Amino acid sequence: MDISQFQQQLDQKGISLSNEQLQQFERYYELLVEWNEKMNLTSITEKKEVYLKHFYDSISAAFYYDFSKPLSICDVGAGAGFPSIPLKICFPHLHISIVDSLKKRITFLEHLASELKLTNVAFYHDRAETFGKNKEFRESFDLVTARAVARLSVLSELCLPLVKVEGHFLALKASSAEEELEKAQKAVKTLGGTLEEMNNFSLPIEESERNIIVIRKDRPTPKKYPRKPGTPNKMPLE
């Protein structure tokens, strides 16, 4: 996906990018490749692939969820900033918090935000399990996102405790999402969530499968969740 295809495809979805926003994506790509030589941020480095599989793929969340309103968003395990930083570039009014357990990635994201002149962004070097127990952040976000971090039963325990009641958790998944969703039903319900919708589509050009799962938080998450670091992964609520 070259830059003109990227712009055109987003335009068709009602997302128009200014020259400044396009320059921000260009600089994002440059920094991603530059820093990737020093640390492992992504295995995808070819420009057309980054624009399709990282930038466009991240923004696809906005095809199924309304990001035009003011939102406080927490991105769990964002790695090199996906999906929250591409969404922030497209919707500058968003308030973004990113939690990642690797300090080096947080250092990259802080530098990226500074270079792209992003405001209302905050970065936290922490495990999601610990962050979700922190009274300052627990049940405080309108929306929590996660992209391909872990299977849905695990992700639900890491993300739903951070969502405020009547807020949403958005999971961006590749294939096998239906199977994951089936296994995650108990976890979602236990943690106070209800499946609102599941959206299936194909990425343009290469036609690979993508799924965006929208879970609504109906009830407060029981205090014992999330469990200790590592436990959700070892013993998922299935």
Image: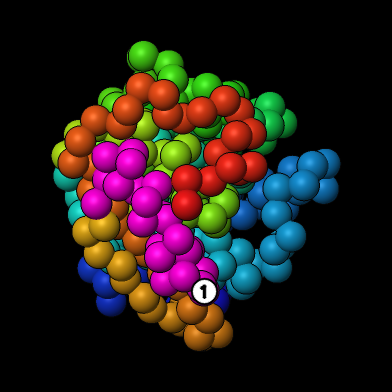
Point out the image quarter for the N terminus: bottom right
Determine the residue positioned at 74% across, 60% down: 43
Image quadrant of residue 127? top right
Q: Would residue 111 appear left or right of 87 to someone viewing this image?
A: right
**Tag 1 residue:** 175
Give the colour scheme of this rendering. rainbow
* Vertical position of residue 214 compared to residue 227: above or below: below
Determine the residue positioned at 20% across, 36% down: 219
Q: Nearer the viewer, residue 157 or 143?
A: 157
Considering every residue shown, the one lying at the far top of the view is 135
Q: Tell me if residue 193 is in the magenta stretch.
A: yes
Image quadrant of residue 231? top right
Q: Would residue 107 appear left or right of 36 to someone viewing this image?
A: left
Q: Tell me if residue 162 is in the magenta stretch.
A: no
- The secondary structure type at the circle numbered 1 is loop
Determine the residue positioned at 27% across, 72% down: 13
Read off the magenta span.
171-194
Q: Nearer the viewer, residue 220 or 118?
A: 220
Q: Residue 233 at what x, y percent from top left? A: 60, 43
Q: Would residue 120 appear left or right of 81 to someone viewing this image?
A: left
* Vertical position of residue 78 compared to residue 208: above or below: above
| Residue 55 seen anywhere in this rendered image of the structure | yes
Q: Residue 12 at what x, y percent from top left? A: 28, 76
| Residue 88 seen anywhere in this rendered image of the structure | no
The amino acid sitting under disc 1 is Ser
Q: Residues within 10 Å of mark 1 (few under 14, many from 20)?
A: few
